[in-house]
Amino acid sequence: MYKIVRKRALNDSVTLMEVQAPHIAKKAKAGQFIIFRVDEQGERVPLTIADYDREAGTVTIIYQIVGASTKLLNTLEEGDSILDFVGPLGVPTHIDPNAKRVCVIGGGVGTAIAYPQAKALHNAGIAVDMIAGFRSKDIVILEDEMKAVTDHLYIMTDDGTYGEKGLVTNKLQALIDAGEQYDEVIAIGPVIMMKFVAATTKPYGIKTLVSLNPIMVDGTGMCGGCRVKVGGQMKFACVDGPDFDGHEVDFDELMHRNSFYKEREAADREDPAH
Ligand code: FES
């Protein structure tokens, strides 16, 4: 059993939990994930490791309360325990030791996955600019944490209620136009956002990494839900990734399949026997 030592609501639908899991904390690296199962009846759900504390032996996860499993997880409080907490899984994000300046982009709750990557780069002595996009001010998360590990933090909101109004790609384009030189761009968020970030950097030949955690279903390599074509080859995000070269990912096919899964999920919610 894995004890919850801290629980904090980051906004109305996103929660941070710090869990006692010393074996995972000892080995965890940015970009990796865990699979949790709340109880015997629960499904296995993958979640990115948002942070870890090797000394305290804790792992931090951040989740959006969207389905039955995250709803159930969110009923637990500090002092309660989670039945299964397995990891670290997935290939850690590759930190290029020659990179001097990297732009990390997070969209919505994807910011929780982008943050540990920004932190790992910062700890490796690389200058980090970060662009974090949210729908509006009330769902902005991790602002202080992001500020602490970046040279510049640009917050964008769709409705202009905080930071600058606009999309993360507007800001990225403006920074490139202003002459900022990035050795790499790392993007994590909705698939459509990652697609447009990759399209923005492609003409400039800026290496672009996308993290496909958002498309994972069970994280085991068996459900096939995270299949993605990369450079013409079929890959599984949970086994071969989650990070891939953004210029090689077939986003259109991915979005097509993703919408199929969403429709299917919605149908399952209406009629579980569907
Ligand atoms: Fe099921 Fe990758 S998430 S196979």
Image (cartoon, helix red, strand yellow):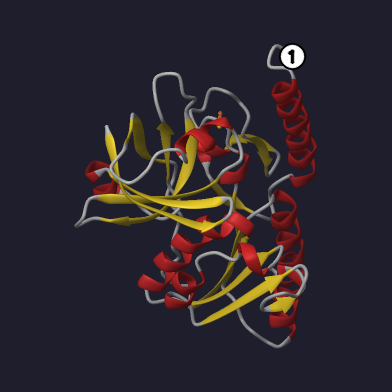
The residue positioned 56% from the left and 60% from the top of the image is 111
Residue 232: percent from the left, percent from the top? Answer: 71, 39
Residue 122: percent from the left, percent from the top? Answer: 41, 73
Answer left or right for 10 relative to 7: right
The residue positioned 58% from the left and 37% from the top of the image is 216
For residue 274, above or below residue 172: above
Instruction: Place residue 262 in its image quadrant.
Output: top right
Is disc 1 surrounded by few (<14), some (14 to 19) or many (20+) residues within 10 Å? few
Answer left or right for 197 relative to 78: right
Instruction: Pick out the residue farthest to the bottom.
Output: 178
Residue 250: percent from the left, percent from the top? Answer: 74, 44
Residue 141: percent from the left, percent from the top? Answer: 54, 64
The residue positioned 49% from the left and 82% from the top of the image is 151
Quarter of the rendering occupied by the C terminus: top right
Instruction: Place residue 83 in its image quadrant.
Output: top left
Q: How many marks?
A: 1
Under circle 1, the secondary element is loop
Instruction: Pick out the residue farthest to the left.
Output: 55
For residue 47, above or below residue 170: above
The residue that disc 1 covers is 274
Residue type, numbered disc 1 = His
Answer left or right for 123 relative to 247: left
For residue 40, above or below residue 112: above
Picture quadrant of ligand 1: top right
The residue positioned 66% from the left and 37% from the top of the image is 228
